[in-house]
Amino acid sequence: MNRLKLVILLIFAFSMKLSAQNVVHLCIGDNHNFGVPDNPTSFFDWSISDPSLATINSGNGTHHILIDLNNKGVFQLLVKEIDANGCSGYDSILVEIHALPNPNIFAIGSTSFCEEESVLLQVDSNYVTQSWNNGTTTFYTYADTSGNYYVNVTDTNGCSNNSNAINVVAHPNPIADFSINGICANIPSQFMNTSTVSTGNIVSSIWYLGNGDVVNGDSLLYTYTFSGDYYTQLFITSDYGCLDSIGKWYYIYDPPIASFEYNPFTVSTLQPEMNFVTTTSNFISVFWDFDDSTYSVLPNPLHEFEDPGTHDVMLMVTDSNQCIDSVMHRITMYYDFVLYIPNSFTPNDDGENDNFGPKGIRMEKYESYEFTVFNRWGEKVFTTDKVSEQWDGENGITGAYTWSIIIIDELGAVRKKVGEVLLIK
């Protein structure tokens, strides 16, 4: 048998063709094409010296085959050509199958961090080429966004493989913000924490209030003693340890000074009206509480008190900065005890002076009332505890009678009166 000088063509994924050579270096796990120049009238018989290393996938009998490279090692690939005349020739080549590289990447630092931070990822060795999935081509890369990171390497045998993957989580930073309600000295200012975070929770809020005071808390009430400019800062931390802060200038104003005058100095049940005048400077609104369930928003109201006693009249004023102050004065309304009792009456049914009894003001306000009439022998001829009832002289004869009144007035004072009346028929 004559040995044919055949040329074996190796067709790789990158379409490179090689002439027959002593050893061809390939990588485990790949599929590779092998071929010789075609002769349409020939039959080509291919064989592999160690079928445990590689197997013919397709094409045996033709000039071109596809081989699966299964295991690491060296085998001989042999091809025998038989032409139409029964003449044969052969050629062979050695193929060495190399193991794939097994790169390993590791993180230098935490793989869980906050926005605008990063972690260094590094492959365990230098290879001929390194290609990270974020585009970096060095043996290390900085990961600054969330995702899975890995590297594809190629070794000196031209074999490539992916590394293990490392999951990186970049937590979003919280966004610090706040608002303030109330900017008046000696009145609580409300600091409202309006900070947000897209994932997780805000676990710490620290306020620097511009006057040396530091307060922990979400939202808070704080009272400034003095007016002036203050720079307040809020520092927040999320449950992932991510930070943000914000600072704002604002001015604390002095509140208005509430004051009012009134005239007359006292009132009574007969003269219950009093004039009130707001004497506060630079107010924009007022509110009066007269301590008798009545109120006013007029700057200078006229008020009529109904019940005697003391009334704590309060004025609250508000200025253009929404600062508030209030003041109170105690007003006394005196009780005018007015009671009239006639000294005679004529019960003759003429419609005039037919009944006998006291008359006065605010008698319906008495806490208790007892009115009694006696004859000349001291016998009771009439008694009542109702202010609306009077003696009509029934069964009475012309003559003098005595009477007594015992009253507890609306202020709780006990008042007693006695006297005489002449019944005329």
Image (tube, rainbow, N blue to C red):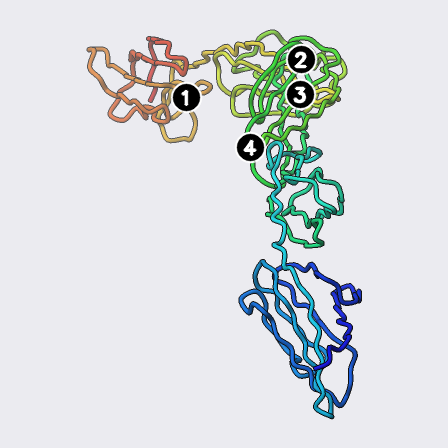
Quarter placement of the N terminus: bottom right
Report, in whole angstroms, how far the alpha carbon at label 3 lies from the one at label 2: 29 Å
| Residue 111, position as x, y percentages in the image | 60, 37
As shown in the figure, which amino acid type bears the numbered disc 1? Lys
Vertical side of 306 occupied by 73: above or below:
below
Quarter placement of the C terminus: top left
The kind of secondary structure element at disc 3 is loop
Residue 3: assigned label: none
Give 407 or 360, whichever is nearer the viewer.
407
Res 81 → quadrant: bottom right
Report, in whole angstroms, how far the alpha carbon at label 1 lies from the one at label 2: 46 Å
Residue 209 horizontal side relative to residue 19, left or right: left
Upstream in sequence: badge 1 or badge 2: 2
As shown in the figure, which amino acid type bears the numbered disc 2? Ala
Upstream in sequence: badge 1 or badge 3: 3
Q: Mark 3 vs mark 4: give the one in front.
A: 4
10 Å crowding of disc 1: few (<14), some (14-19), many (20+):
few
What's the residue at 57%, 8% (across, down)? Answer: 266
10 Å crowding of disc 3: few (<14), some (14-19), many (20+):
some
Give 218 or 223, whichever is nearer the viewer.
218
Vertical side of 30 occupied by 121: above or below:
above
Residue for badge 1: 365
The answer to whether the residue labelled 3 contacts the one labelled 4, judged by CB atoms less than 8 Å apart, is no
Upstream in sequence: badge 1 or badge 4: 4
Residue for badge 2: 185
Residue for badge 4: 239
The kind of secondary structure element at disc 2 is loop
Report, in whole angstroms, how far the alpha carbon at label 3 lies from the one at label 4: 58 Å
Residue for badge 3: 301
Residue 297 horizontal side relative to residue 378, left or right: right
